[in-house]
Amino acid sequence: MKNTVVVGAQWGDEGKAKITDLLAEKADMVIRYQGGCNAGHTVVYNGETYKLHLVPSGILYGDKICFIGAGTVVLPENFEQETSELISRGVDLSNLKLSPLATITMPWHTAVDGWAEDTVKKGKIGSTRKGIGQTYTDKMARCALKVGDLFDEETLSEKIDIILPLKNKTLKEVYGLKEYSKAELLEICAKYKQIFEPYVCFDWQKMLRENKNKTVLFEGAQGVMLDIDYGTYPFVTSSNPIGGGAGTGSGYGPTMIDEIVGVSKAYLTRVGEGPFVTELLDETGDKIREIGHEFGTTTGRPRRCGWFDAVIAKYAVLVSGLTSMAITKIDVFDDFDEIKICTAYKDKRNGKIYTEYPTDVFMHKYLEPVYETHKGWKCSLSNIKSYDEFPKEAKDYLKRLEELFEIPISIISVGPDREQTVYV
Ligand code: GDP
Ligand code: IMO
Ligand code: MG
């Protein structure tokens, strides 16, 4: 297998973890390059379900190096919970490595995220409340703590002296939230150090160099439409899930990447606020949610559901540099008489047709989807093992998707299990 990036091509929850877990079998190393525990990645293996948040979805094999890269943010308490749960279920974490350059989510980040979610009415993001945006903001503002800082007393003390007065001022005066003393913060940091100690990899340069000629899989979180630069801004996350993110967040440059596999569901979902042109607010949307079990892995929120949007898929192919697409959850349509695909948007005000994604998302309220309708296959796809076994209607649907997003479909997923996968 070539070095491959797995990228969500929609608004997250496309089934990236299932595809990463599958491809990881042939990889030596899996690197998570961005995001934090806002991600909820489900891997079903041997009838057991594992919900991962920051730990790369190759961890269940045991023998793959699983590296959490510099582009990620780490909420220590969640990381501790995730790792101890995996250990208690017998998963071997001796190959789990954490970059000292990953940014720490501090208690004020989650506090401010919660404050914003509870206070802001107009323009609310609907975040996962994990302090993601606030951590990345401080990283960019150059006043964040990195995992490595915890391991040198002098550096930590010096950094706290720089950060704390500014933090306390904004916590108190802007948000009316709890302030911290230096002693209190040092105690918190000592606890965080303990949590990270078994995993932090100060030798990461050596490790990456040694694996340079082996097979590396890069795991994206979230999806292209949640990308800070290319997504439905401001209703996005605060990192770069696109393929390019693997070039900055992993520790390897873009020259290490051979292929970028996009993951799309056969329909669309979104959690949180923001525009969604093909959203179904009727019983068809409810039917997709029910059959597809579309409830958030991290927050349990019901996911908004809608038809496949080829305008978005084509956009994802472009901005993420996708070389092939994995289509998941096609089995959710087994009982549908008709399936729709959105091929363009129409502006209700003037009839203008858009086939390229309009990036000004504040005008999306004026857009309606232009649909074409496909006949359903009305039989179960869950046990299909090869492409030839798909009924004609399913093949026609898949062929049409391929035609619209202009890259080949490489994988079709017909159920959550590893075995429920068809390679094309
Ligand atoms: P991720 O965040 O992209 O990794 O996706 P999630 O894990 O949040 O959500 C995908 C859900 O769909 C999980 O519950 C998976 O077990 C499930 N899943 C993945 N592929 C398939 C599929 O082909 N069919 C069905 N029915 N479920 C799937
Ligand atoms: P995976 O990796 C779906 C959404 C949130 C919100 C927006 C910003 O499982 O696909 P944040 O907490 O990141 O500041 O929230 O992004 N969001 C996701 N939606 N899947 C995810 O991850 C998500 N991570 C964040 O719902 O709309
Ligand atoms: Mg998810």
Image (spheres, helix red, strand yellow):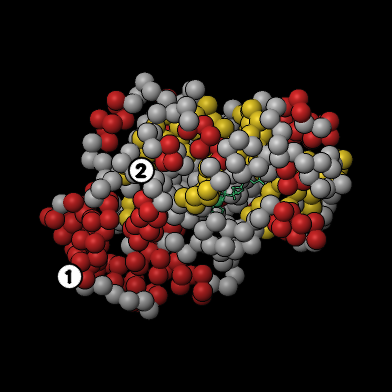
**Which residue position is annotated with label 1?**
183
Neighbours of disc 1 within 10 Å: few (<14), some (14-19), many (20+): few
Amino acid found under the numbered disc labelled 2? Asp
- Relative to 305, is 144 on the left or the right? left
Q: x, y percentage for residue 156?
A: 18, 56
Residue at left offset 68%, top offset 58%: 304
User: In the picture, residue 168 is in which quadrant?
Assistant: bottom left
In the depicted view, which residue is nearer to us: 219 or 317? 219
**Which residue position is annotated with label 2?**
92
Estimate the spatial distance between the alpha carbons at disc 2 and disc 1, rounded to whole Å: 35 Å
Visible in this render: residue 225? no
Provide the secondary structure element on which disc 1 rests: helix
Amino acid found under the numbered disc labelled 1? Ala
Mark 2 vs mark 1: give the one in front: 2
Residue at left offset 80%, top offset 61%: 282
- Relative to 159, is 22 on the left or the right? right
Residue at left offset 81%, top offset 41%: 379
Disc number for residue 400: none
- Relative to 268, is 17 on the left or the right? left
- Relative to 327, is 65 on the left or the right? left
Is 182 placed above or below 320 here?
Answer: below
Residue at left offset 51%, top offset 69%: 117
